[in-house]
Image (tube, grey):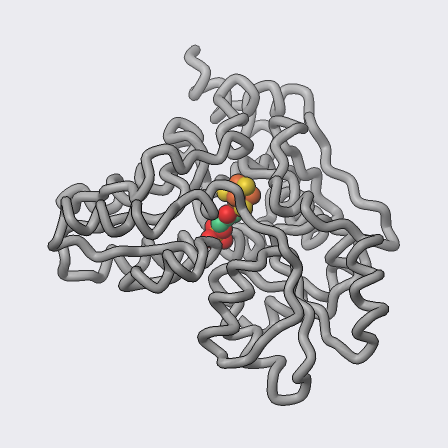
Amino acid sequence: MNIIDKIKKLKQEKNAVILVHNYQLPEIQDIADFVGDSLGLSIEAARTDAAIIVFCGVHFMAETAKILSPQKIVLLPDKDAGCPMADMIDAERLKSLQEKHPNAVTVCYVNSSAAVKALCDYCCTSANAVKMAQHILPNNKEIIFVPDQYLAQNVAAQVKHDFIIWEGYCPIHAEISPENILQAKKRHPEAKVLAHPECKPTVTALADVVTSTEGMSKYIKKAPEKEFIIATEIGIIHRMKKENPEKIFYPAKEAAICSDMKRINLEKVLWSLENLSYEITVPPDIMEKARLCIERMLEIV
Ligand code: 13P
Ligand code: SF4
């Protein structure tokens, strides 16, 4: 039996579901029950009836799944698959910032630890950050937004309101430069430019569409255009090609690869199912508090 058949058999025997982020390796996307962005994966984690969730993504995503489905076993096939941006803030440093702004509402990007989420009023993803800001702003003018400074700046520009910003960033998206976009546009003048809001505002300013990975996929399916320049982690291009075989995709930067996302492979998924490893746990007090800010987001979007 080959490895894919072994994974499928074990998945059925153990009543497991495989949730996969858009940046995962092609072979992992191909064995998924659901491939999506951070928001779609959170929603799927909350509604699945499976007993086990094998989360092929990074740690904060698996943690979010566990918070939303505490009675389920949530597995991350590589225990070291983290997110450098999420690691740029911790609960202690967030607390000190909040002490300086006692009346501020705190919004955290889903790319943050459960301990950070537990201190926040609202969570958001790249798919709903603008909507969340629009929901919060009428009653709260002082908003702390952590940890992604570029997402915060991109949202601030759209809602025309400044936030108290944390200076975190995604090292992969921050490396995509305006030069990369201008060169790609020169080579492919007919192509539409799609950029992720984790890119710097100097990059998103050059894009036709600024949206989450799921937003990009939806846009491409409906778009009459045939060519697209993709300014995000290049793993999503596998899904784009699969869903739109007649369309052409050019990465804005070939080297935009998240090594954390690529840590998971088929062997690790099989190992994970065989050994129920690595099980994600969250201390109960943090879990309860962190769930509130995620649920508040899910009620709004
Ligand atoms: P989305 O898939 O939510 O757009 O997020 C991108 C990302 O960097 C996740 O780590
Ligand atoms: Fe974190 Fe960036 Fe990798 Fe996403 S792509 S997991 S934000 S480092």
Give above or below for 190 relative to 235.
Answer: below
**Residue 182 location in percent, x, y?**
24, 51
**Residue 100 found in image quarter:** bottom right
Left or right: 157 with respect to 193? right
Q: Is residue 134 above or below residue 14?
A: below
Of residues 244 and 70, the one drawn nearer to the viewer in this rendering: 244
State the image coordinates of residue 109 (x, y, percent, origin top left): 61, 59
**Residue that appears at 14% across and 61% down:** 224
The percent position of residue 218, horizontal first and vertical second, equals 32, 58
- Report the residue that reaches farthest toward the top: 1
* Residue at far bottom of view: 138
Who's the residue at 61% across and 83% down the image? 137
The residue sitting at 65% across, 47% down in the picture is 86
How many marks are shown on the rendered structure? Answer: 0
Q: Is residue 72 visible?
A: yes
Q: Quadrant of the N terminus?
A: top left
**Residue under the image location 72 percent in, 75 percent down:** 105
**In this rendering, does residue 17 appear at all?**
no
Q: Is residue 204 left or right of residue 221?
A: right
Residue that sits furthest to the front in the current view: 179
Left or right relative to 96: residue 298: left
